[in-house]
Amino acid sequence: MSSNTKQYELLQPPTDGISQLKFHKTENNKLLVGSWDQQVRLYDVHANHLVASHHDHKAAVLDIAFGTSCAYSGGLDRRLLLWEADYTRTREIGKHDGEISTLGFGHASGLLASGSWDRTLRTWDPKAQNSAALIKQIDVDERVYSISIEGDVLAVALAGRKILIYDIRKLEVPLETRESSLKYPTRCIRLMPDRQGFVCSSVEGRVAVEYLNGVDKSNYAFKCHRQLADNNIDLVYPVNAIAFHPVHHTFVTGGSDGVVSLWDPEHKKRLKQYQGYASSVASLDLNASGSILAVASSYTYDEGEKNHPPDSIWIRSISENEAKPKSKKS
């Protein structure tokens, strides 16, 4: 990508595919990254410095999450690891019977949630030791693809397009069960910061904005992350990642077309498009103040094995006006 004073590349990126990156909930410059090289890395994005890393997984890391003062990771080795607060050692707090595909930490409840291809959703008390950490296991109909937590609300996206909404403290019965309005498998789900609804994306270049029961707003979906080829054919790309602005509640999406778009869900319009990342946008996140966007440019193998650019993480400044919703007249 061309040089830009608002954007720079992080030094010492992962050496294999980047699966997820996430900012700390309150500390603006702490960025956690999980990758297929079996490592978890912690960066200070302001200093452009790799603070710490661990290689304690035995296979690819598929997701990561910050706790209050520590971090968590899970992946193909089925183990759930806690990275201690000083980032010098890890300990295993639990396991799944299948690969751990997604993690989320509830800062309101202090509970960690994990989803797996073993068709279970589990919650953990990270303060407990080893097997005592498991609080609840729920069997679900399909593989768990993506989860999101805001307050005590937990959203779960399954294979087969099913969406489950829970109170994370009471997993016995979901608050809502619905089918995604998107026709193809879900890649990512993210709850709105005000917990009125969620946004989910699919492999066929679409995003759905849906509201929870009792919220007097209409659901809708739209096409995005598409390009017109020379022969006038519409090239459709998976939408891999979603992140909400913590202040203005606009959101960004990242696709396998290498594009990041900024959306205003209230006025149903695109505010900005950031073009030209060298590879798929595999993951992205906004920091606690919404002033920094981190973007993982990393090939997601949608087109199978092929030569591709090196994996990279880009840090972009986001101005106050850039992320604000715009009125319909503007």
Image (cartoon, rainbow, N blue to C red):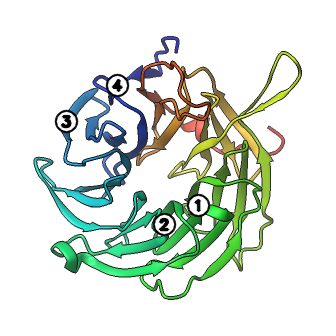
Which residue carries the number 3 mark?
A: 51
Tell me which numbered mark, 3 or 1, is placed earlier along the sequence: 3
Give the answer, above or below, for where 58 lies relative to 117. above
Amino acid type for the residue under numbered disc 2:
Glu
Determine the secondary structure under disc 1: loop
**Mark 1 or 4, closer to the camera:** 4
Amino acid type for the residue under numbered disc 1:
Met
Determine the secondary structure under disc 3: strand
Amino acid type for the residue under numbered disc 3:
Val
Residue 77 in view (yes/no): yes
Amino acid type for the residue under numbered disc 4:
Leu
Determine the secondary structure under disc 2: strand
Could you tell me residue 202's position as x and y percent? 67, 50
Contact, mark 3 vs mark 2 (Cβ under 8 Å): no
Which residue carries the number 2 mark?
A: 150
**Mark 3 or 1, closer to the camera:** 3
Farthest residue toward the top? Answer: 2
Which residue carries the number 4 mark?
A: 10
Give the answer, above or below, for where 166 lies relative to 53. below
Give the answer, above or below, for where 5 lies relative to 22. above
